[in-house]
Amino acid sequence: MASGVGVNPDCLSAFQALKLKKEHKYIIFNLNKGFSEIVVEKTSSDGDYDTFLSDLPETECRWAIYDFEFEKEGAGKRNKIIFISWAPDDAKIKQKMVFASSRDGLKRSLTGVAVEIQGTDYSEVAYEAVLDKSNRGN
């Protein structure tokens, strides 16, 4: 990986539990204290999107996976796994740089992501914005 940051095996286990077993609705990933490894910060089975958004800190970067359910006109219910890179404007520069350079390593290890969203403020990760991006394509 470009940043030299590894992905903890728990990240893959949590992702598989979300993707295959539907044990989680979302997962939030963070860097450990030494910025040397990506770790699972939180998993939740709460399907409320606003609850998920409240778990994204206002001034710190995170990555998240969300199992997004929505209605597609004429096609019924759909599910897409969303990968969110959360880097708010108020986050520290060093944190933003390490998160940006480590993102691809995490994303590559999580096969099955349908939509990727990069957010610097809550409007970019709002339900409507994610719905709009999810509705494109199939």
Image: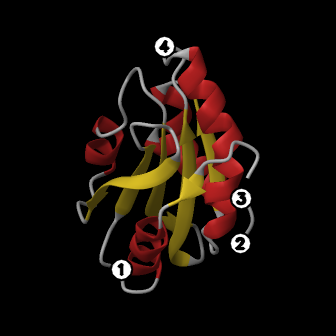
Sequence-first tag of 1 and 2: 1
- Mark in the foreground, 3 or 4: 4
> Would you name the residue on which mark 3 appears?
136
Q: Secondary structure at mark 3?
A: loop
Q: Nearer the viewer, mark 3 or mark 1?
A: 1
Pair 1/4: label in front: 4
The type of residue carrying mark 3 is: Arg
- Amino acid bearing label 1: Lys
Q: Quadrant location of residue 6?
A: bottom right
- Circle 2 — which element? loop
Residue visible at 53% across and 44% down in the picture: 36
Say if residue 123 shows up in the picture. Answer: yes
- N-term-proximal mark, 1 vs 4: 1
Residue 124's place in the image compared with 20, above or below, is above
State the mark number for residue 138: 2
State the residue position of label 4.
90
Residue nearer the viewer, 67 or 136: 67
Left or right position of 115 against 27: right
Query: Which residue is painted at 45% across and 59% down in the image?
Result: 66
